Image: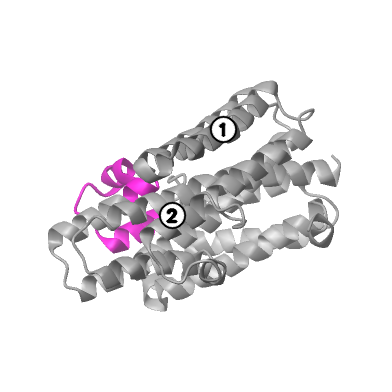
Amino acid sequence: MLSRTADHLYWMSRYTERAENTARMLDVNYQMSLLPQSEAAIEGAWRAMLEISELTYAYAAEHPRVTAGDVILFMVSDMDNLSSIMRCLQGARENARAVRGSITTELWETINTTWLEAQRMMREGLLSTAPGEFFEWVKFRSHLTRGVHGGTMMRGEVYDFIQLGTFLERADNTARLLDVKFLAAEALQQEQAKPVAEFYYWTAILRSVSAFENYRKVYRDVITPERIAELLILNRNMPRSLAACLQEVVDTLSRVRNTQSAGTQIAALTLLSELHDMRIDEILTKGLHVYLTEFLDRVNQVGGGISKDFLVPLEIAA
């Protein structure tokens, strides 16, 4: 496969997954802001989300204060923000258009319709009247895109590079979501929040990654932060866990490997092996924020290796 074709497929899937995960982060933050807490705690949660998304400086260049409305607009509809939902949906559509001959008609039509419908929703003001409804729609369209991909695409290199982009992006975003919500939980505890508020806080986090029912099946007991971290980091059967995502990345790299990708394969396999061998108490003793920060650095290194080994060189793509 031509490296440019692989590049378009890889980024098509990463942009689709990023739009969904941004919607998930915004949705859980929006729900949390409705719980009884101080204005400082609410602002801190939005500020933490900007920081973990590495968007603090870009946001500050346009907005003097951190408010829920401004952050939502910045992360959904601001086309100057390269990570906004609308910019990601546009990026997915443009990359899909570039490789229309390599993907099925159904997949192209799904991605193209998502972009057109998103523009219509922005014109009609759905984001200001019902942000939760818009976030759910973004998640649904991402599910639909993956379903069409899985149900219509031949199993080959095209399929594999789409899978590779999806699961590398998902691992990155699950780690970011965990990091920002556990940091915000510390502020909630400092305010001596009532048990009911804490229950809804952790429940909302589980629902944001479609893990509430899975948690109940695994633990059948009270919801605790430690078990949430274990489920979303180490559980190989949880689709959005770091271990499950890295397993998919490793398996896909083994299928698309070439003469120069051995180093990237080893880096991904080493990270996966460590996840399989670790216990959640070891991670918590080290510090969840420290561990997730290191994990994000190493996942980004794997992504850089994939770009170097298979895709258009970064400086050319830029």
User: Label 1: few (<14), some or many (≥20) within 10 Å?
Assistant: many
The colour style of the image is one colour
| Residue 94 x, y percent position in the rendering | 71, 40
Q: Where is residue 69, by image quadrant? A: bottom left
SS at mark 2 in the image: helix
Q: Where is residue 13, by image quadrant? A: top right
Point out the tag, 1 or 2, that comes first from the N-terminus: 2
| Residue on which disc 1 sits | 114
Where 129 falls versus 174 (above or below)? above
Query: Which amino acid, mark 1?
Result: Thr
Q: Residue at x 42, y 77 (%)?
A: 286
| Residue 166 x, y percent position in the rendering | 60, 45
| Residue 53 x, y percent position in the rendering | 52, 63
Where 233 falls versus 207 (above or below)? below
Q: Dividing the image into 4 quarters, which one contains the N terminus?
A: top right
Q: Is residue 163 visible?
A: no
Q: Magenta region: which residues?
A: 206-234
Where 211 falls versus 41 (above or below)? above
Identify the main secondary structure in magenta. Answer: helix
SS at mark 1 in the image: helix
Q: Dividing the image into 4 quarters, which one contains the C terminus?
A: bottom right
- The nearer-to-camera label among 1 and 2 is 2
**292 or 137: nearer the viewer:** 137
Query: Which amino acid, mark 2?
Result: Ile
User: Label 2: few (<14), some or many (≥20) within 10 Å?
Assistant: many
Residue 289 marker: none
**221 or 240: nearer the viewer:** 240
Residue 72 marker: 2
**Residue 229 colored in magenta in the image:** yes
